[in-house]
Amino acid sequence: MTAPDMSVNIAGIKLRNPVMTASGTFGYGEEFSEYVDLEKIGAYVTKGLSLKPKAGNPTPRIVETPGGMLNAIGLQNVGIDAFVEKKLPFIRSVNTPAIVNFFGNTIDEYAELAHRLDELPEVAGMEVNISCPNVKQGGIVFGTDPACAFDVVSACRKATAKPLIVKLSPNVTDVTVMARACEDAGADALSLINTLTGMAIDLQKRRPVLANVTGGFSGPAIKPVALRMVWQVSRVVKVPVIGIGGIMNATDALEFMLAGATAVQVGTASFINPASAQQVAEGMEDWLLKNHVTDVKSLIGALET
Amino acid sequence: MQFKSMILSNFQVSPGYWRMRMTAPPEFASARPGQFVMVRVNSAIDPLLRRPFGIFDVGVHTPSHSGGVSQPCFEILYRVVGKGTEMLSSLHSTDQLDILGPLGKGFTVGEPGQDKLIVGGGVGLAPLYLLARELVKDSPVRLFAGGRTRDDILCITEFERLGVECYVATEDGSLGRCGLVTEALTATLDMLQGRPSIFACGPHGMLNAVARIAGQRELSCQVSLEGYMACGVGACLGCVTPGRDHSVEHPDYRCVCAEGPVFESSDLGWGR
């Protein structure tokens, strides 16, 4: 039997298969290159980037909870200048689309970064982070107020012709309102979900475990919430949806596609097993072969309700 | 590297402290003292994350029964502190584990002939045995092992067998000298000629005290740190520690797993 067609297209970015890595869980790609064949995955999304380097939050930044983890890294990153100088050469050497996740504190900063990234041929597309729960300024306000989201995405849209993905927060009353606002502002695709805001408490110390008090909850425990939101959003927008949230294996990824995702991102799983994204892609192909599905695209939104 | 490992032995060395021997691929023999492994305790999702452990020893396992085949192996020394280590302690020989490693930057061994002083607090001894094995090849080595009680003093006979001169201090006086391990360290430093190098691993308070002693005497001091980490390869940025120039206004964080876990103590910020 011939191999199934695993390719998908996200806003003009051709992916050899629907599996990407999620921002903040895969560094700049190089960190994991010893353990995973980057040319076996669809695309990789780099750690959230800002104009200036950002030091991040005090420690503890991470705590494990049953079936998941909380993080409050605080968007620590090298900044665009060091990114261009130190990270781009590696990205150039890999024959897989690199999507750069970025954020700003103001609309102008978002637009400036979109413009800077637009000039880099190595950057296949951008993912606008309007949903980080761990920074006080910027970030979350753009991700929870549809008018702010519209403005920031519009500004980025004007600054770049490259594929523009907007990453949505689940920490809203109605995710479809945010999704529509971003689509109206010119987003080429939507990725969801970012982490759910959560917290953990140390009973004996009577203190929060994280120095930041709250953090972003990720891992297999959040998958049902993510599936529901991907399903809701994919029914109301025309642009492709990228499903994210607790994907540990091929079954999880295929469920997201049935719910309406065109592609998926593997996040926390890469921490546990650096080859996760590659193994998810291989497992999906195996499933398609076994189930006589010739094209992975036929699964997108094929949920029977 | 990532590999499947089979447990060869797993036993309690002292109440709450365990020592596990596991198979390793031949390439693992290149592990440096101070490097660590990330161990996946089981294949379920709870516990979810791997657990980091310093490499206690690397060698070749020769089965006691006749006809067994010798194979490369390594050991970890661990304390049962939560669900993950509790589950680890319940595993038996022939059980399988998924390992990432050796990871991180280990100790720099320094000049031959120079006095080497190793300071370990409790399970902080874990990465120091492999170091001692390396150092005794060409230097006089002393170990300062500290703990709250005698139960926290681990594997001293192993160090003695290497020819290491061992000083023990417990806070309750149940073994060795009564008091802090840093008191014995200071007394020895007062007596030694030349410029010894210090290597330390243990609780943050002890490391802070050792770093201060080394700083006052302008001696080289390498410390091995612990951190809450998810990945172990420098991607999650969960395990950072304040560097020398760290302040709230001008943060200076170092990544424990990728830039460490061993740091020159003068490169770190000890303010907190």
Image: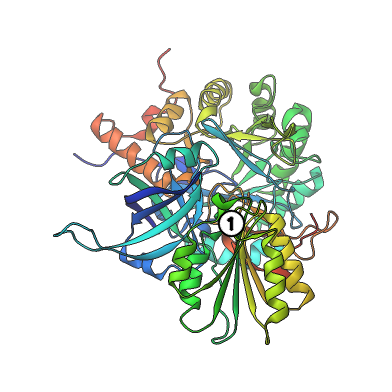
Q: Residue furthest top?
A: A305
Location of residue A6 with respect to B159 vertically, above or below: above
Q: Quadrant of residue A198?
A: top right
Q: Residue furthest right?
A: B249
Residue shown at 57% from the left, 57% from the top: B124
**Residue B87: x and y, percent?**
44, 38
**Is residue B78 or residue A240 the one in the foreground?**
B78
**Is residue A200 or residue A182 the one in the foreground?**
A200
**Residue A305: x and y, percent?**
43, 12
Residue A226 seen by the camera: yes
Location of residue A98 with respect to A233 vertically, above or below: below
Q: How is the image coloured?
A: rainbow
**Residue A22: x and y, percent?**
55, 43
**Residue B256: x and y, percent?**
62, 58
Q: Quadrant of residue B182?
A: bottom right
Location of residue B96 with respect to B2 vertically, above or below: above
**Is residue A31 or residue B242 the one in the foreground?**
B242
**Residue bearing mark 1:** B175
The kind of residue tagged 1 is Leu
Task: From the viewer's perspective, tell me whether residue B239 is left or right of residue B249.
Answer: left
Element type where label 1 sits in the image: loop
Task: From the viewer's perspective, tell me whether residue A267 is left or right of residue A300.
Answer: right
Residue shown at 66% from the left, 25% from the top: A180
**Is residue B149 or residue A184 the one in the foreground?**
B149
